[in-house]
Amino acid sequence: MQFPIQITPQQAMQELLEYNAKVVKGVELLSQLKEEDIVVGCSEKEPVYSEDKLVLYRFKSLVDKPHPIPVLVVYALVNRPYMADLQENRSLIRNLLKLGLDVYLIDWGYPGREDRYLTLDDYLNGYIDTCVDVVRERHGLKQINLLGICQGGVFSLCYTAMVPDKVKNLVTMVAPVDFHVEGSLLNTWTCGVGSKTMDTDLMAEALGNIPGDFMNFGFVMLKPFQLNLQKYAAVPNLAASQDALINFLRMEKWIFDSPDQAGAAWSEFIKLFYRDNKLIKGEVEIGGKRVDLGSIKQPVLNIYAEQDHLVPPQSTIALKKYIGSQDYTDAGFPTGHIGMYVSGKVQRDLPPTIANWIKERG
């Protein structure tokens, strides 16, 4: 029979003293840091187009002759896209540049009160289509590659289905497809329990834009212990290293840098995708155009996180049942949703997976 490990009062006091010393050291380091020390976005880029709050960036190439067909990164609306380029040793963008890809990125900016009536039609058939045309014209191409991340992956699927002639290859990353799979915490939060559902139209009418803090609170409460208590209890252990502390603060900056959501588009997205799961039913219609996943004939690389609590793997890999492509590949990585950007192991394996796949079909 085993007994619990006994801790003497002296040992408990020693651990408490050591923990307090770490806290004091952490406070000292924090007091020395300035806001400009928490730098995010490590890769050099230049704006090549802007419209309203949107800016289209092209990253500076890190090779002499980049791949001739560029990649346009379409990120989600809910967070800032610099997570894909967080810091030099944890940057999906930088690693793709090193591997010879020519990378563009859409920065959606921060919607203001005047943007409350923007719809999914405005985002897809307006902003994304214009950015695709800008990249095509700059390179003299009929088609370019799309890399859609999370909600941006949903946008990229819809866009490719509606405008297939402009897309050469499609890469989706941690993108939900079947929004009603079991274990989807976001679906539970968004659609409620049983017959109780969120009245998104009423929220959009009352609030105009949906506050980023509201969205953030919802994400954090999906894992309240891990994302509120456990995470911050571990902070004193970082105090011995200023670099480790800065890395932690970079992540915190991104997590709480949540733009407001244009009310009309947010409500439309929740109803079409989360509430009614219309993407896999072929019933999504945007700007008078029906989204039929079966019309996607392009090569598709579908990437998912095996431990994703926001977008369960089953939600992502459901895509292969609905698209019309004969060249479909899915690739899973042993991490969670955020780990796709910050895990050292993933950043070693993910960028070559994307780059090699695109080059083979270039």
Image: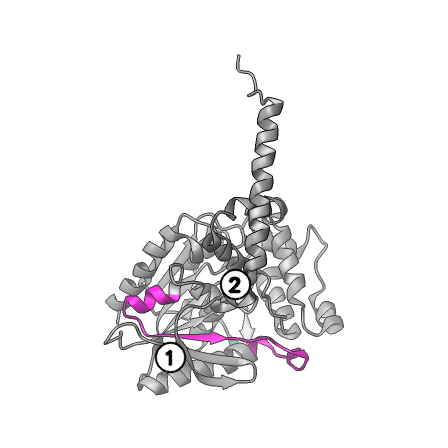
Q: Calculate the distance from the C-alpha at mark 2 to the C-alpha at mark 1.
A: 24 Å
- Res. 190 in view: no
Residue at image x 31%, y 83%?
141
Extent of the magenta region: 93-121
Dot 1 falls on a residue whose secondary structure is helix
Q: Nearer the viewer, residue 243 or 204?
A: 243
Residue named by callout 2: 281
Residue at image x 46%, y 51%?
313
Please name the amino acid that badge 1 sits on. Lys
Q: Residues within 10 Å of mark 2 (few under 14, many from 20)?
A: few
**Residue 12 % position (x, y):** 60, 28
| Quadrant that contains the C terminus | bottom left
| Circle number at residue 166 | 1
Residue at image x 40%, y 58%?
303
**Residue 190 % position (x, y):** 64, 58
Residue 218 figure quarter:
bottom right
In the rendered image, residue 95 lying in the magenta stretch gets the answer: yes
Residue at image x 66%, y 73%?
263
Q: Residues within 10 Å of mark 1 (few under 14, many from 20)?
A: some
